[in-house]
Image: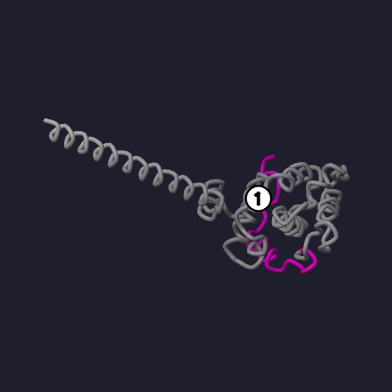
Amino acid sequence: MSSDRMKAPLLDGLTRRLAETPTVFLAEPRIGRRGQLEVAALVTDLLLSLGGDLLTPTQAAAYTPKDKGERNRARLVAICCWLLHAECFRQPSELAAPIATLLQSGLDELAGLIDAGRFVSDPERREELVRRVLSQLDLRPAGESEHQAADRLSALDSVERERVLRDTRARLEAERVRKLKKQMQARQAREATAKANREW
């Protein structure tokens, strides 16, 4: 999908929309008999409004958290449903399929790292979520080139930052193990030399 064929959304308007997320979209997702929010119903409503299809029972089950571990993802999907009801996304024939993909799997990494509520309360996380959503829909904020949009998303990207931290920790641990191994080998060599000298 070419972003040139669609009206570029205003970043400020979308981040403000997130800041004003209604409490109904922030309610506790239903897990078993607990919680109030049926996230699958929100997703269905959004996709139908874009000209998409009803969710199958299997698809709907993916938006129904089975335990607390899946709760944050469901909360983030609900918040995104509110965001994606914005007027700039009302392009039924073009956006229904990519939005369905985004909601199905495009939020998993973010949900695994950051509490969903921060995408409403924290200005940087609001911008990150808006930029990530736009990027996955092949859109960019009004007034920005593709390069500018990519750079700004990269600067805010929690997933990439976590990957860099994880890689750094792995490198530091590998270096620590290498140094310990070298120290042990040096000690063993010294002990072997000392033993040989005694026996001599």
Return the x and y of residue 131 as percentages of the image width and height: 61, 53
Q: Residue at x 66, y 51 (%)?
A: 133
**Residue 195 located left or right of residue 54:** left
Residue situated in front as seen by the camera: 50 or 54 = 54
Seen at 14% across and 32% down, the residue is 199
The location of residue 144, given as percent across then percent down, is 57, 52
Q: Is residue 2 left or right of residue 53?
A: left
Q: In the orientation shown, which residue stands out farthest toward the front?
A: 199
Side of 144 relative to 34 (left or right):
left
Q: Nearer the viewer, residue 182 or 36?
A: 182
- In the image, 102 versus 91, the foreground residue is 102
- Give the magenta-colored segment's residue range: 1-25
Q: Give the image location of residue 111, x and y in percent.
A: 65, 53
Name the element at disc 1.
helix
Instruction: State the scheme by which the image is colored.
Output: one colour
Tell me the quarter of the picture where residue 197 sits.
Answer: top left
Mark 1 belongs to which amino acid?
Answer: Leu
Residue 184 quadrant: top left
Residue bearing the label numbered 1:
134
Quarter of the picture holding the C terminus: top left
The residue that appears at 53% across and 48% down in the rendered structure is 160
The residue located at (70%, 64%) in the rendering is 17
Dominant secondary structure (helix, strand or loop) of the stretch shown in magenta? helix
For the N terminus, the image quarter is top right
Using residue 118 as the reference point, say whether residue 53 is left or right of it: right
The picture quadrant where one finds residue 86 is bottom right
Residue 97, above or below 123 = above
Q: Is residue 161 above or below residue 181?
A: below
Q: Position of residue 85 (x, y in %)?
A: 78, 57
